[in-house]
Amino acid sequence: MGDKIRSYLEENKRRIMMSLFGVIICAVSVGVFKLAALGVDSFQSLMSGLDSVIPIGFGTLYVIVNAILLIFSLVVDRHNIGLATFINLFLLGYITQFTYDLLQKLFPEPSMIFRIVCLIIGIVVICFGSALYMTADLGVSTYDAVAIVMSGKWKLGKFKYIRICTDLVCVIAGCILFLTAGNPVNKIPTIAGVGTIVTAFFMGPLIEFFNEKCARPMLNSKKPE
């Protein structure tokens, strides 16, 4: 068993490092998104709503929610689950929380211009991190796996349409939870705003750009002799 593990780690060393750095980069970018307060991606909208009503740390909450989604995938279709899934599950939430808390201390009252800059930086960084994580191909996030199961195994429709539906559910649920926690309606754009719309339309092309220019060459580059 030990030899198999060592063999796996040796064969997939570069993929594992890309997955690890990809998740870390994505987690930092989500913290930047949260500081910008101009809207986050769909799943983080849901997480922001849950974070408003459940009195535990964001990192721990992220692990719990993703553990529930992981159980769903393990029961229904475990083919999409891999090492990177667990890296995402246990690291992303805590790194996001640390990054956001640190940025809040450094920039307690960011101006609108600064927030817009943070939004732009967050979008670019999360796309770069996603490209590393996805190209490594060692498993998808538990949230991504849900739409894959619904489209691939259950045949409920094409993936892109199923993903739009799951994203809409996350945004709507996140906003309802956010309001339930007592937050005013005019604060909704902080979790479901322009950033949410921009990520929906621009993340795909940007991820593919970083795939082509950075992630794939990094994965396929030969070791120096």
Image: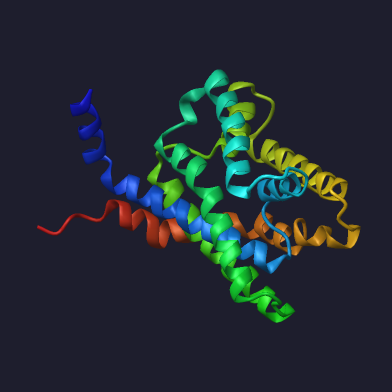
Judged left or right of residue 217, residue 87 is right
Q: Is residue 12 above or below residue 157?
A: below
Residue 160 % position (x, y): 65, 41
User: Where is the C terminus found, in terms of image quarters?
Assistant: bottom left
What colour scheme was applied to this rendering of the protein?
rainbow
Number of dots carrying numbers? 0
Q: Which residue lies furthest to the front in this view?
A: 55
Q: Is residue 186 above or below residue 78?
A: below
Judged left or right of residue 166, residue 12 is left
Q: In this view, does 69 lie above or below 45?
A: above
Residue 27 % position (x, y): 53, 55
Which residue occupies 63% across, 29% down?
Answer: 151
Which residue occupies 67% across, 46% down?
Answer: 43
Residue 126 in view here: no
The residue closer to the viewer here, 99 or 127, is 99
Residue 168 % position (x, y): 76, 43
Judged left or right of residue 181, residue 195 is left
Which residue occupies 73% across, 60% down?
Answer: 39
The residue closer to the viewer here, 42 or 103, is 103
Q: Residue furthest left?
A: 225
The residue closer to the viewer here, 96 or 54, is 54
Q: Which residue lies furthest to the right in this view?
A: 185
Residue 77 % position (x, y): 53, 22
Location of residue 106 (image quadrant): bottom right
Which residue occupies 89% across, 58% down?
Answer: 184
Residue 28 in view here: yes
The residue closer to the viewer here, 179 or 200, is 179
